[in-house]
Image (spheres, helix red, strand yellow):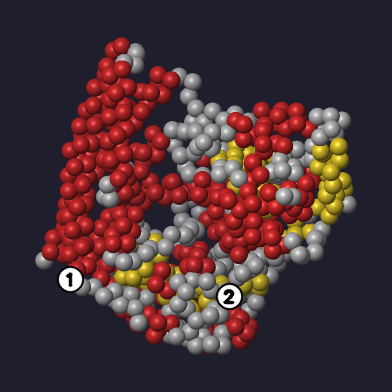
Amino acid sequence: MSFFDKNLAALQTTNAELAGLLGRESQKSRTDSIFFGDLRFEEASLVENATSKDNHFVLTATIENVVHRFNSAYRPLSEAETWAGQYEWKNSKIVASVFGLGNGYCVRELLKSQKNTDTILIFEPSQNIFRFVMEHYDLSDILAHKSVHITVLSLNLAQYFEQLGRHVHWSNAECQLIGEHPQYGKAFPKAKELFYSIIRKNNTRVYTDRNTEIYFGKIMVDNTIKNMKFIKNSMSLERLHGKLQEDIPAIIVSAGPSLDKNIDKLQAAKNKALIIATDSAVPALLRHSIIPDFAVSIDAEKSLHCFAAPESRKIPLLCEIQSTHGIIKEQTGKLIYLHCHPYFTRLYEQLGEQIPTFSVGGSVATAAFSICEYLDIKKIALIGQDLSYKDGSSHVGGEVHTILGEEGGQCELEGYYGGMVKSRHDWQGYLAWFEEEILKIQNRILVVNATEGGAKIHGAHQMPLQNFIDEYCKTQTGITELLDSFQMNWDSNKRELLIRYLSTGLKELEKLASESDKTRILCTMVIDEYDKTKSISEAMIAKRKEVESYNKKVNGMSVYSLVDACIREVTVSWLQDVNLYKEDKKEEFMQFFRSAKEIHTAICETADKLYPLLKEVYQWYLE
């Protein structure tokens, strides 16, 4: 068996997608550059092996007419050992991102220190180098390793985003290791910039998500429980997946100031494209007698003025069960959940509904874009997506909406028509999200920026809205008839199931309050004993196992996800460094009890507060 076949078989066990792509790419001619829209990355034009002084292979490649050597010409294995030795693996749940696989020497050394809980993400910028080493080196031990995930820039770039999102959490973000294979940064500077940019932006997302959970956790739970009364009028977005007519385009309408320029042109797209309006854009559309096919609202605290008009409440609403209660309760059109609080995800599964899970980005516009991706829409136009000010206004109709810290977050971005436009930090973040998302999907989805103003979105094709409508909006969508065909089929059996589910939740809250209070007392006793003796006894070790056992039971309770969201500020303060290595083992041992005491105190108090809220919904359904 050749090296390539052996390596491909190993890769198939851990990454069948990449293995399949590599096989399909084998017949294509090799190029010297990789293009993503208007972005160009370096590619190796000639890859070869040389021999080191100690008779090992040395990988070389010609990139941009310059020959680069990626291993020591004398002792490449010793070099790899030294390179890997600079990284410490003391922390837990480490995620190591490595720029460049090379010929595998360096990564193989990393694996000698890596623990079972650690992950290695390899970002290989050159398909030609990857194919060459697959053909000339035995990498099967690396490729078959379950904790190693490989991204090849021109083949499966989206996987790197997905793997970072899957493995990096706020609790282990500080445990990341980032490294470059020798000489890769010099050989592939543009790809290196992309590599670090993805990591930086993922870290920003992780910490933003953490801060959002802390700030909105209690509000989201309050909305979630109150919105349970309207579950009869809801359905999952999953029902629409695969049901839309093929090649139906979508137009995402945001509320940027440039929307005034082309909003009236949307009349020509009605029933020939899915018109999806962000909540802030709904009033402007209604003023122009345009009823969108969907509105999107995902914020836990959203101004009610977006849906103040009676006709706005009939529009099918793409939302989350934790979206603003004041909006949900007034809605008479279908509620279509794209996300659901984990507590109610379990319930929907029992009701026969599967709630999809996908990243929605940081804004209602990015959520609308993610929805289009999930629905397999192949042509998406953005309008009103300015991401900048226009003559001092931030929104359509000359409106000015301010945010906290706005003045300190001012910046400039490249404009739709060239030059620079005035923007701010949150819009800059959304722009980065759109550009990265387009980078991932450009081979299968056409994205058109038809805003006709504002900031330039790299990777999106710029086209006037009228041209997009003329070229792509030609088929009747049939969306109204499709939505009318979906019924919740709410019957007595589902009602009884819901009542039983809520009843179980109430019993779990009672148990949480009681047992967590006992755990708090146990932790207090251990802490007091340690403060007196400064030693760890066998009894303390046994009590730790007792607390750990109870923690597992708590995590298994369906209602705990509600409690956890409410106490996120407490859990974050204790758990954000839980994976960091600590020299003082006694202090590390006692930190477990100190954090457990504070967390279970918060659990007890929160369970008591949530009980009457959940009981009110339970009694409402009974009556």
Which of discs 2 and 1 lies nearer the camera? The answer is 1
Residue placed under numbered mark 1 in the picture: 492
- Relative to 173, residue 91 above or below: above
Residue 431 x/y as whole percent: 58, 60
One can see residue 609 in this view: no
Amino acid on which disc 2 is placed: Lys
| Nearer to me, 541 or 55 | 55
| Nearer to me, 118 or 607 | 118
> Which quarter of the rendering shows the C terminus?
bottom left
Instruction: Please rate how many residues cluster around mark 2, counting C-alpha atoms within 10 Å: few if below 14, some from 14 to 19, many from 20.
Output: many
| Residue that extends furthest to the left in the rendered view of this protein | 623
- Relative to 542, residue 67 above or below: below
Residue 99 x/y as whole percent: 68, 44
One can see residue 250 in this view: yes
Helix, strand or loop for disc 2: strand
- Residue at image position (34%, 16%) is 536
Amino acid on which disc 1 is placed: Ser
Locate residue 362 relative to residue 152 in the image: left or right: left
| Nearer to me, 457 or 154 | 154
Helix, strand or loop for disc 1: helix
- Relative to 148, residue 154 above or below: below
Q: What is the spatial separation of the Cα atoms under label 2 and label 1, in whole angstroms?
A: 42 Å
- Residue at image position (29%, 23%) is 542
Instruction: Please rate how many residues cluster around mark 1, counting C-alpha atoms within 10 Å: few if below 14, some from 14 to 19, many from 20.
Output: few
Locate residue 63 relative to residue 407 in the image: left or right: right
Locate residue 469 relative to residue 478 in the image: left or right: right
Residue 353 x/y as whole percent: 34, 66
Residue placed under numbered mark 2 in the picture: 379
- Residue at image position (30%, 54%) is 343
Please identify the quarter of the rendering in which residue 100 is found.
top right
Of callouts 2 and 1, the N-terminal one: 2
